[in-house]
Structures are given as structure tokens and as C-alpha cells.
Amino acid sequence: MLIKGYDAPLVAGEPLLARRGFWSNHLLAMCGEATSAGRPAPEWFGDDGADTDAMSETLFDPGRWPVFRIPAAEGPGAVVIYRNLVGDHGIDYLLTHPGRSGAQRIGSWEGELPGAGLTWQDLVRMAGSPSPGAEGVEDVTARLLLALPLLDDLELPETAPTRLGAALVTAGAPQDTASHTAERLLAHLSGRPRHESAWGSPLSGS
């Protein structure tokens, strides 16, 4: 697999989405610190510690950098790359545009995500418009959760926690804790430094 700007052993990561331990690896760090309600744990995503550890070895293998493609039928899509440089692990997020061969890097997740991200509306639009026949992730739930770390919205709609909770359940999270997990994820994302609303979204070309 070739992506401009990445002279690295990139491999298609989409098959990993169905394996236990993936979502806890991808999202657990966004649940924030331990509180009186408990410490974030893989079980919040339907995984256990062994699942999560085994998947970590695969996701962060310096010899294979998993790539998750989120092509969109309408408007820009995204690419998620596990950047497995020795001593410099991270997750890069690139924006792809219809009709363009290149991709625009819009952020990296290494505990925090610098720069402007996506509004909830942008995120839902991207997740809900898979491109027929294009290589990448087609499942709407997986698309939403993969791109979730890019969420950067000053005014989330009231429906956001319910929508995210339902997506977590579909992905394997326990029904009785999914709403709490969704709230923790959204609270952590909304609590980090953000762009001003006047800057617009990177999807708009601002």
C-alpha cells in the first residue's frame, strides 16, 4: 500500500476491526482519567486485558503499520494510520478529497490532538456516506468510531451521546455501560483545547 509522505510498511488494517481488543485500543485513552465512577477499562468496550494486549502487539508493530480507509461517496473522507516508528508511536489522521490523489494530514493522536478537528455534523456525514466499490471501511458504525478522535465541536447536539452509545453497543460494548462510556468519550473530547467556531471545519476548506 502506498500513501504519499509515508515511506513505511503500510498494510490494510480493515480486517482488524472484527477482532477483539481493537476498539479498546483505539478509544480507551479518550475516556479520561479515573474518577469516582471508576477507571477506564477494556471491559467498557467488550474486551478483556488479554484481548487488548494481543491487539496492541499487532496494531503497534514497527514492521507493519495498519491503515484504515474511510472513503466517502459525498465530500471528503479520511485515512487513519497507526504510525509505528520506534520511539514515536502515534495515530495519524489524513483527509482525502474526491478527485485528488493526495491526502491532507489534519491531526495526530498521541494523548492529545492538536489543531482543528471535525464538527459532529461532519463526522456523522462522513460515517454515513461510504463510497460503493471503494477500498476501505463500509460499516457506518466502524467509520464513526474510527474517526471519533477527530471530533472537535463546541456545541454537540443532544442526540450525540445516544448515537455514540448505540454505535458502541453495535461494536460489542456492554449495553448497560455503553451510555456511560459514550459520555466519558464525549466529555474528554469536548474538554481538550479546540479551534474557534469561526475557523470552520477542515472539511470546508477553511
Image (tube, rainbow, N blue to C red):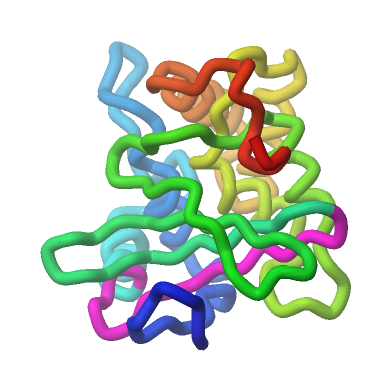
Please tell me which residue is depicted at 50% across the width and 33% down the height of the picture. 116
- The residue range painted magenta reads 59-74
In the rendered image, residue 36, in percent from the top left (x then y), is placed at: 29, 12
In the rendered image, residue 117, in percent from the top left (x then y), is placed at: 54, 35
Which one is in front, 104 or 40? 104
In the rendered image, residue 108, in percent from the top left (x then y), is placed at: 38, 49
Which one is in front, 184 or 156? 156
Question: Residue 62 lies in magenta, yes or no?
Answer: yes
Please tell me which residue is depicted at 72% across the width and 65% down the height of the picture. 71
Please tell me which residue is depicted at 65% across the width and 61% down the height of the picture. 96
In the rendered image, residue 102, in percent from the top left (x then y), is placed at: 59, 70
Q: Quadrant of residue 17?
A: bottom right
Which one is in front, 136 or 161? 136
Above or below — where is 128 with respect to 12? above
Above or below — where is 58 with respect to 194? below
As drawn, the residue found furthest toward the front would be 206
Please tell me which residue is depicted at 35% across the width and 82% down the height of the picture. 7
Above or below — where is 27 with respect to 184? below
Q: Quadrant of residue 79?
A: bottom right
Question: Residue 82 lies in magenta, yes or no?
Answer: no
State the count of labels: 0
